[in-house]
């Protein structure tokens, strides 16, 4: 019974580590996309268009 409890605990720790790696990977991709978009001025253009649509000033 103790062996079973230990194996379950080890699997839970492994799952937690896998989730952490996925989150780090997603954050790295998001950071790269933000850096790419900010470098080209895409974010500024996007928010300008959204603001213009909301205020009706085309």
Image (cartoon, helix red, strand yellow):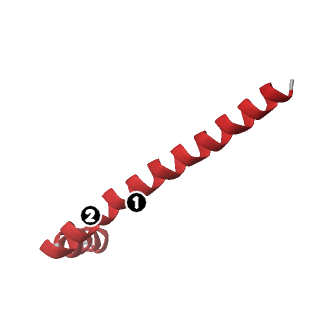
Q: How many marks?
A: 2
Pinpoint residue 42: horizontal percent, then vertical percent: 17, 69
Pinpoint residue 49: horizontal percent, then vertical percent: 21, 69
Judged left or right of residue 16, residue 58 is left
Q: Residue at x 20, y 68 (%)?
A: 37
Nearest to the observer: residue 48 or residue 20: 20
Which element carries disc 2, helix, strand or loop?
A: helix
Q: Earlier in the sequence, mark 2 or mark 1?
A: 1
Quadrant in which the C terminus appears = bottom left
**Could you give the CA–CA distance between mark 2 and mark 1, rounded to whole angstroms?**
9 Å
Quadrant hosting residue 57: bottom left
Mark 2, Cα crowd under 10 Å, few <14 / some 14-19 / many 20+, is: few
Judged left or right of residue 26, residue 45 is left
Pinpoint residue 29: horizontal percent, then vertical percent: 31, 57
Q: Residue at x 18, y 72 (%)?
A: 45
Judged left or right of residue 57, residue 25 is right
Tell me, for residue 56, which label it has, or none: none
Nearest to the observer: residue 29 or residue 48: 29
Disc 2: which residue: 32
Q: Residue at x 45, y 48 (%)?
A: 22
Is the C-beta separation of discs 2 and 1 under 8 Å? no
Residue sticking out furthest to the right: 1
Above or below 20: residue 51:
below
Pinpoint residue 10: horizontal percent, then vertical percent: 68, 38
Nearest to the observer: residue 40 or residue 10: 10
Disc 1: which residue: 27
Above or below 27: residue 58:
below
């Amino acid at each position: 019974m103790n062996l079973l409890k230990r194996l379950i605990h080890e699997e839970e720790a492994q799952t937690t580590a896998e989730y952490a790696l996925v989150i780090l990977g997603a954050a790295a991709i998001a950071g790269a996309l933000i850096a790419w978009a900010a470098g080209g001025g895409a974010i500024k253009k996007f928010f300008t268009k959204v603001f213009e649509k909301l205020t009706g000033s085309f």
